[in-house]
Image: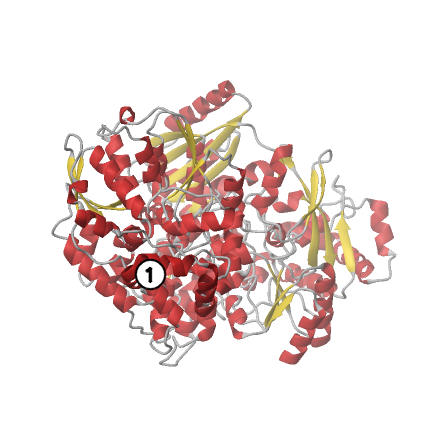
């Protein structure tokens, strides 16, 4: 493809167009096993942009690959054409009609975001995929998505009333329901739209054609059906039969994977929100067979959800920082769990439904435990189930649960028999498959575990898919229930529907898209499923020497490869959590965790140079990663981009000297101590307008920032001068050690004093020993040799001293939690680091546990009323929890405490000080945190335990925030 022509196209559209190496790598994969570099990436802002792109495609013969969240499992978004990403700009609600319960949206709107906007009207869009917090309505239309709610609310095809599309000739056409007279009028049009109606009428009118469709397509009772084009839905209309259904091409376009037209507007039928009262029974089974045998039984009840998880999925949750807490309802070691949700208008009616279902399970199934869940418990359990796809990435090593046969659907009456045969088939391949998902709809996401880096398993990949396709055909099932055909299943469609129907599919594509510009190679005329895989089979695995230890993932490359493309990092701010702050600010795939992982993987596997880390493109992609650690806990695959970035920067520095500013920030503790030669002079230089301005200009620091001031005395100095501060002031309870981090020591000394006062007044003796700084700043800037020395010295210092009886407590989260995170990767003796880490706590964690043990009570605190809002540090959220902070601040009886669902504050250590990052930093703060603080009344206390967070809050809102330990100190009754 001539790049100059693409660049010319870029100048003609309002949106963005990229042809550089970085963006091609970012969009070379989706959530499937495929990889193909596109010729470029277009990000349109308008319908006019899309028309320009389509005209260009016609002139130049380039394929167009529609893409939104890029969560496709079958390779729909992968190809060598021009990717069109509609998620960034085309994401608005255009029209809402409350009376008709309809909404018109652009294709890039996220499903959960749409439903949040509809909730005040007691309405919602029913189909609900596991990716609902980032998947778009356009993508759901393309795949005819369904999800966990289909047994009550149907599939996307059932909800689409109208589609505004751009056809292959650039004309704008709206497809909608037509009565017989309107259909006849369409046949008279002399344009592409008229041709489409006429040719389809001629093609589908013969009775023998309709009969062939009925005989070869999946059974009509299988509602999840995406194999090929939905011609069966078209003939089920008053135009072709005695059906009471009107004709609507939307039935065909839903599930067509962007191969027929480009959708620009979608009109949806909405449903009223389900009944308020709900419960879930988690039925536990000792075998998959027993679990599936119960499905037909439980589906006799009025269920809203009937989902399954097997032991493999459940075991993947054990090591997940986020999801292991969601295992609370699991009893024993089940091989399968059915998650059965029921709803009712009243609590009495709900209890009746619970009793009926529980009785049926106890008397007519082989469940050994039936755990009943309510309220938040249901949400947590469903989140565990929804994380299934990403959790499969937790399988260590190169063998992964591969998507190829994961979307089969059969009639409910056939499910148990089908799975029995499927299991036997898998045993013939020496496979133990993964079973999870939509049991109540006759669809399970079944996955073989394969190593697609090996030719032997690539062969199995194809053989297993072929044999399962034959089995699905035997049961007249659907080979794709909701994930689509894409690349992985398209080459089997002919076998599944027969030659005659496959020829109809080809004609369908030819009628709509004669030049084959719309997503070529999907559904029809696909390449063999084993081509264009993400990994080249039998490749020589790249070897990399890293300073950090990635043995927990079997090396740095495999750690990066844990990202399977599920795109959890693309969820919107309103979905909660922290991941991924920079993506939320820019909405660019380049700034998502997935995007960074893709580029790192490309660097490791597609570059032969011994200087592969000397790569400015990769450094640029990692630039806006603020090392918040959100991905480490919120990504189901536990991708730890902060550590990957630190390692990359270290390697990059071997070829490129770090800037003076980076060196200064990395060694800020050393410089702060030197500033104590004259604390007054240093603070004057930092605060006097003209000197402060000069310093910022020299160091390229944002002019809007206030430079931090040194405390009058360091905390170490104060303790040295008055060691009695550390003695227990009440009845002795326990001895604890305090880690004096570099920030508390030099900048936030008063917070340290407050912490000491709280502990000693509560009866704890404190010990302080000489130790090194934490190394947090060095890690964030990639100065890993220096960080490694500091970490190992601290490990040696504290290992003999710290135990369950004498824990180590820290004040600053990012410094303290290094002991439980990066130190495990930097330690010369990992077993020592692991043992030490088990007894290192944030001070809030320690106090919360002491409260639980009854050693601290509310009687020790004042009774005055206060309202407090908590902003938790990112590392605390990722590696610990904000709950201990919440718990200790709730100890005083009349304190009203809430947690701001704030994600990241945006400062991220030095990141927000850097001039080029200031704007993004403030965008992140403005997403949730700043508005929540601005809305708070003047007498509301803002709690923030991170020093960077407190600076960011002040710079963004001009309100001072306080460390929670200082709030607690002020409430403490001093004897």
**Nearer-the-camera pick, 963 or 109:** 963
Q: Residue at x 16, y 36 (%)?
A: 728
Mark 1 Cα within 10 Å, few/some/many (few <14, many 20+)? many
- State which quadrant residue 722 falls in: top left
Q: Position of residue 561 (x, y in %)?
A: 39, 63
Q: Left or right? Give the position of 556 relative to 407.
A: left
Q: Which residue in the protein does label 1 denote?
A: 777
Q: Left or right? Give the position of 63 relative to 611.
A: right
Q: Residue at x 44, y 54 (%)?
A: 907
Q: Residue furthest top?
A: 348
Q: Position of residue 880 (x, y in %)?
A: 33, 45
**Nearer-the-camera pick, 929 or 762:** 762
Question: Is residue 406 visible in this depiction of the protein?
Answer: no
Q: Position of residue 203 (x, y in %)?
A: 75, 58
- State which quadrant residue 733 falls in: top left
| Image quarter hosting the C terminus | top left
Q: Position of residue 677 (x, y in %)?
A: 27, 62
| Image quarter hosting the N terminus | bottom right
């Amino acid at each position: 493809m001539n790049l100059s022509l693409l660049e010319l196209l870029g100048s003609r559209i309002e949106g963005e167009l990229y042809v550089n190496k970085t963006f091609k790598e970012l969009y070379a994969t989706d959530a499937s096993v495929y990889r193909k570099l596109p010729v470029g990436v277009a990000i349109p802002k308008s319908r006019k942009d899309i028309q320009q792109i389509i005209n260009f495609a016609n002139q130049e013969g380039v394929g167009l690959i529609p893409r939104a969240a890029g969560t496709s499992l079958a390779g729909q978004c992968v190809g060598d054409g021009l990717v069109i990403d509609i998620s960034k700009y085309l994401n608005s609600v255009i029209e809402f009609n409350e009376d008709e319960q309809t909404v018109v949206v652009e294709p890039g709107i996220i499903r959960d975001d749409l439903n949040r906007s509809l909730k005040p009207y007691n309405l919602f869009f029913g189909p609900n995929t596991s990716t609902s917090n980032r998947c778009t309505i356009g993508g759901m239309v393309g795949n005819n998505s369904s999800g966990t709610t289909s047994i009550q609310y149907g599939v996307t095809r059932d909800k689409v009333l109208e589609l505004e599309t751009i056809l292959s000739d650039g004309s704008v056409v709206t497809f909608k329901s037509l009565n017989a007279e309107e259909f006849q009028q369409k046949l008279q049009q002399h344009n592409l739209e008229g041709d489409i109606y006429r040719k389809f009428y001629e093609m589908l009118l013969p009775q023998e054609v309709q009969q062939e469709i009925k005989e070869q397509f999946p059974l009509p009772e299988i509602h999840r059906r995406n194999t090929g084009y939905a011609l069966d839905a078209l003939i089920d209309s008053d135009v072709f039969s005695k059906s009471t259904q009107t004709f609507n091409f939307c039935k065909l376009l839903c599930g067509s994977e962007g191969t027929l037209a480009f959708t620009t507007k979608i009109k949806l039928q909405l449903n009223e929100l389900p009944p308020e009262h709900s419960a879930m029974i988690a039925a536990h089974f000792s075998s998959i067979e027993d679990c599936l045998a119960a499905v037909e039984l439980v589906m006799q009840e009025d269920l809203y959800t009937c989902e399954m998880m097997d032991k493999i999925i459940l075991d993947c949750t054990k090591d997940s920082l986020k999801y292991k807490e969601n295992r609370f309802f699991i009893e024993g070691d089940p091989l399968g769990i059915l998650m059965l949700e029921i709803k009712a208008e009243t609590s009495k009616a709900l209890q009746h439904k619970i009793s009926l279902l529980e009785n049926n399970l106890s008397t007519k199934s082989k469940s050994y435990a039936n755990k009943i869940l309510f309220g938040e418990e249901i949400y947590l359990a469903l989140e565990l189930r929804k994380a299934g796809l990403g959790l499969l990435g937790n399988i260590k090593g190169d063998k992964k649960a591969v998507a190829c046969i994961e979307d089969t659907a059969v009639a409910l009456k056939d499910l148990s028999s089908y799975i029995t045969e499927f299991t036997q088939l898998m045993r013939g391949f020496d496979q133990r498959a993964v079973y999870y998902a939509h049991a109540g709809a006759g669809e399970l996401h079944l996955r073989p575990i394969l190593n697609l880096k090996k030719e032997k398993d690539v062969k199995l990949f194809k053989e297993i898919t072929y044999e399962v396709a034959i089995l699905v055909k035997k049961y007249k099932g659907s080979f794709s229930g909701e994930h689509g055909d894409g690349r992985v299943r398209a080459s089997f469609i002919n076998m599944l529907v027969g030659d005659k129907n496959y020829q109809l599919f080809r004609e369908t594509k030819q009628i709509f898209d004669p030049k084959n510009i719309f997503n070529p190679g999907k559904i029809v005329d696909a390449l063999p499923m084993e081509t264009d895989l993400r990994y080249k089979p039998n490749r020589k695995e790249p070897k990399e020497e890293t300073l950090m230890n990635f043995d927990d993932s079997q090396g740095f490359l495999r750690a990066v490869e844990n990202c399977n493309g599920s795109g959890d990092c693309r969820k919107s701010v309103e979905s909660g959590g922290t991941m991924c702050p920079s993506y939320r600010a820019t909405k660019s795939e380049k700034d998502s965790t997935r995007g960074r992982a893709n580029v790192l993987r490309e660097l490791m596997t597609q570059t032969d140079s011994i200087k592969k880390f000397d790569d400015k493109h990769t450094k640029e992609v990692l630039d806006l990663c603020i090392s918040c650690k959100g991905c480490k806990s919120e990504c189901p695959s536990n991708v730890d981009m902060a550590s990957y970035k630190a390692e990359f920067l270290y390697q990059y520095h071997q070829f490129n000297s770090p800037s003076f500013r980076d060196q200064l920030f990395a060694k800020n503790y050393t410089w702060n101590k030197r500033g104590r030669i004259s604390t007054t002079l240093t603070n004057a230089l930092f605060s006097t307008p003209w000197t402060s301005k000069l310093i910022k200009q020299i160091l390229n620091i944002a002019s809007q920032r206030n430079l931090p001031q040194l405390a009058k005395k360091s905390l170490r100095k104060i303790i040295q001068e008055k060691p009695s501060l550390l003695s227990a002031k009440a009845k002795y309870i326990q001895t604890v050690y305090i880690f004096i981090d570099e920030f508390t020591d030099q900048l936030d000394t008063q917070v340290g004093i407050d912490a000491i006062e709280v502990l000693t007044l509560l009866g704890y003796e404190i010990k302080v020993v000489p130790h090194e700084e934490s190394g947090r700043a060095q890690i964030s800037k990639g100065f890993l040799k220096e960080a490694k020395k500091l970490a190992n010295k601290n490990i040696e210092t504290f290992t003999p001293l710290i135990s369950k009886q004498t824990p180590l407590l820290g004040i600053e989260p990012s410094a303290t939690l290094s002991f439980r995170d990066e130190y495990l990767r930097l330690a010369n003796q990992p077993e020592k680091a692991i043992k030490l880490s088990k007894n290192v706590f944030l001070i809030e964690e320690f106090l919360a546990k002491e409260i639980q043990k009854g050693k601290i009570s509310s009687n020790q605190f004042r009774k005055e009323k206060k309202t407090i809002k908590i902003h938790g540090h990112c590392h605390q959220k990722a590696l610990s929890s904000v709950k201990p902070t919440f718990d200790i601040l709730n100890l005083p009886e009349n304190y009203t405490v809430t947690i701001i669902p704030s994600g990241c504050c945006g400062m991220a250590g030095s990141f927000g000080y850097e001039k080029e990052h200031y704007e993004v930093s403030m965008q992140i703060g403005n997403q949730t945190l700043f508005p929540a603080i601005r809305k708070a009344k003047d007498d509301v206390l803002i709690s923030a335990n991170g020093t960077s967070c407190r600076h960011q809050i002040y710079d963004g809102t001009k309100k001072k925030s306080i460390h929670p330990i200082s709030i607690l100190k002020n409430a403490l009754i001093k004897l």
